[in-house]
Each structure stands twice: as C-alpha cells, then as structure tokens.
Amino acid sequence: MSYQQFDSDIQIGISACLIGQKVRFDASHKRSHFCVNEFGQHVKFVPYCPEVAIGLPVPRPTVRQIDIDGVIHVSRPDGTMNVTEQLRNYGKEVAPKLEDISGYVFCAKSPSCGMERVKVYTEDGKGSTSDGIGIFAREIMARYPHLPCEENGRLNDARLRENFVARVFAYKHWQTMVAEGVTKHKLMVFHSQYKYLIMSHDLIRYKEAGRLLANMSDDINDVAEQYLAILMAAMKKMASRKGHANTLQHIQGYFSDELNRAEREELCQQIDDYRTGLVPLMVPLTLIKHYLMEFPKDYLAQQVYLQPHPVSLKLRYGY
C-alpha cells in the first residue's frame, strides 16, 4: 500500500489557533503556513481549543501553570480563575473521540496544549521551570502513546518536519491495516514494506522488530501492539546521515549485477557525498529510483523508505 491510497482520508488533530482561528487570549491566532498551505493539501485538520471549549472568553486573561505543593494548577498568576479540572476533564472527554486521527499538532508553550517544555511557575511567581506538559495535551498523549505528535514551532525545522509527516503516514497505514483485521501475513507484509525505513532511523529497533516477528507464537493482537510500539519509537528517533547512508548501501546491493563499474562508483560516490554532507538525501535517492525504473525489483518497489510521503511536500530536499 502506498500513501497515495489513503492520504485524502488522513485526519490530524490540531490546536485551533494554528489553522488561523482567533481563539488566543488576545483574540489573535498563530496560523502555521506549513500546516495550512502545505500539509493541509494532503490531510484534514480537526481543530480544538480547550480553553474556549471550557467557556473562557475571547479575549481573556492569561493563565499559566503553577506548582502549588507539587500539584500543577492552571490559573491566573494570582491563583484566581482556576481551570485545571475543566481542562483535564475536557481532555478526557475529547480523547476517546480521536480514535481515527493519525497525528496531532499542538501549540507550543501553551498551559493547555503544550506538548513539552511548558513553563511551570512557583506559587510566588518569582521562579519557573520549563518542564511542564499542557493539561489537555497530556490527556491526548496518554490515551494514544504511539500517536505522532509535534509542536508548531518545531515544524519550522526541516528534519523535524519530515520526521513528523513520515510518522503520520506510517501511522495511517497501520490504522488502515488494523481496521481490515490484523493477521500474521498482513503484519509480515507491513514490516517488509517498512524494513528500510526503520533501518534508517534505528538499527537496534530494526533488529528488535525482526526478532519479534520471527517468533509470533503469542496472540497476534499483542504482537501487533508490540510491533507498533517498536515502529513508532524507531521512527521518532531522527534518522542520521550515517543511518541513511547505511540503508542506501543496502539498497545499492540489489543492483550489483546490473550496474557497470562506472555506475556503481557513481552511486557509491553520491552516497558518500550525502554521508559527508555535500549533497542532500534526494541526490542518491533519485539515482536509486532511476535504476529501479531501469531494473525493476518488486521488493524494492514496495519500500516505503523510497517515498514515505507526497513528493509535492519536498520534505527531503532540505537535508
């Protein structure tokens, strides 16, 4: 299965302010150009603003996370307008309704929606740490521990952006397979499509996935859940140039009988140039895809690694 078969059905949860809704405390928004103008061409966003949903007005006084005797409260700096339980309860109410989403983009630093590094103030307001998690976001991530999640600011980084989108498409592929009913055969086919993508991200988990599937004597649903955990943990780890180069060299081996000496040396050089940072990933990938068209190989053609997301997003051009 390729991403083209289901990209129009992908739903992504998102903080409402990131798609341009003026729901922030000052009646402004934080519209994400990437989400709305680029990623939005391939997915449907499902927006939520928990602060408005629990009845806070627009505009409204700012709220913050405050540590009071080891317990996090969300309120105004002076402790009034405490909305901690309302936000938590709203998260618990929404979470079960998100079974079909394939990712979530949270608004960074928000006391309700921040995915990480949210400021937590001391009770006297004279100090703070940046180790909090938004009250609403925590409920969503706890309910779906393997769901691809990211923050708007981090999506400005080319590698983080590509990593998030690749995880979203992989997660959707997984959801589609599960909806049709998991079998040992389907799980093996799924893994065969993702082997090189996993390898490029995390060689240790690549081997772990192989060992898991080599002995599928346990309940298939338990095995599937274990596999999903390995897959998403592997993909969350940023693929390094070394990891990509190692994967590309494995793929190169499939053409050893077809390429002449000059062609092999050219491909080797392009992979090495990528490894050392002289060229972007698309340079050796483009040559490999050319050889795949010239010398078709069914196993390679099904590899998600070669095209994990739509070409139009141009996510592999920047690194």
Image (tube, rainbow, N blue to C red):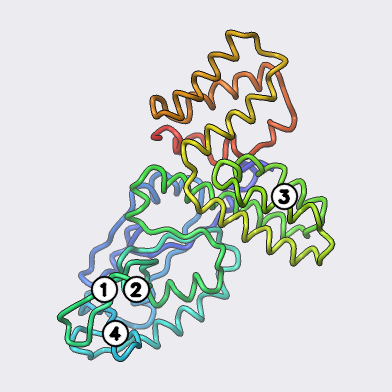
Whichever of labels 4 and 3 marks the residue nearer the N terminus, that label is: 4
Q: Are marks 2 and 3 in contact (CB under 8 Å)?
A: no
Q: Where is residue 20 in the image (x, y as percent from the top left)?
A: 32, 58
Q: Residue at 39%, 86% (x, y): give it.
A: 86
Q: Residue 4 carries which label?
A: none
Label 2–label 1 contact, CB within 8 A? yes
Residues under labels 1 and 3: Cα distance?
A: 41 Å
> Quarter-wise, where is residue 10 in the image?
bottom right
- SS class, disc 2: strand
Label 3: which residue? Answer: 210
Q: Which mark is residue 67?
A: 4
The kind of residue tagged 2 is: Gly
4 or 3: mark nearer the eye = 3
Q: Name the residue under label 2.
A: 132
Which quarter of the figure is the N terminus placed in?
top right
Q: Which of 175 and 66 is in front in this view?
A: 66
C-alpha gap between disc 4 and disc 1: 10 Å
Secondary structure at badge 4 equals strand
Residue 129 bears which disc, if any? Answer: 1
Say if 98 sits above or below 291 in the image.
below
Q: Marks 1 and 3: CB-CB under 8 Å?
A: no
Between the residue at mark 4 and the residue at mark 2, the CA separation in whole angstroms equals 10 Å
Q: Residues within 10 Å of mark 3 (few under 14, many from 20)?
A: some
149, above or below 275, in the image: below
Instruction: Describe the element under mark 1 as helix, strand or loop.
Output: strand
The residue lying at 79 percent from left, 63 percent from top is: 220
**Furthest residue toward left:** 126
Between disc 4 and disc 1, whose residue precedes?
4
Q: Which residue is drawn at 54% across and 41% down?
A: 309
- For label 4, the crowd category at 10 Å Cα-Cα, with few meaning under 14, some 14 to 19 and many 20 or more, is some
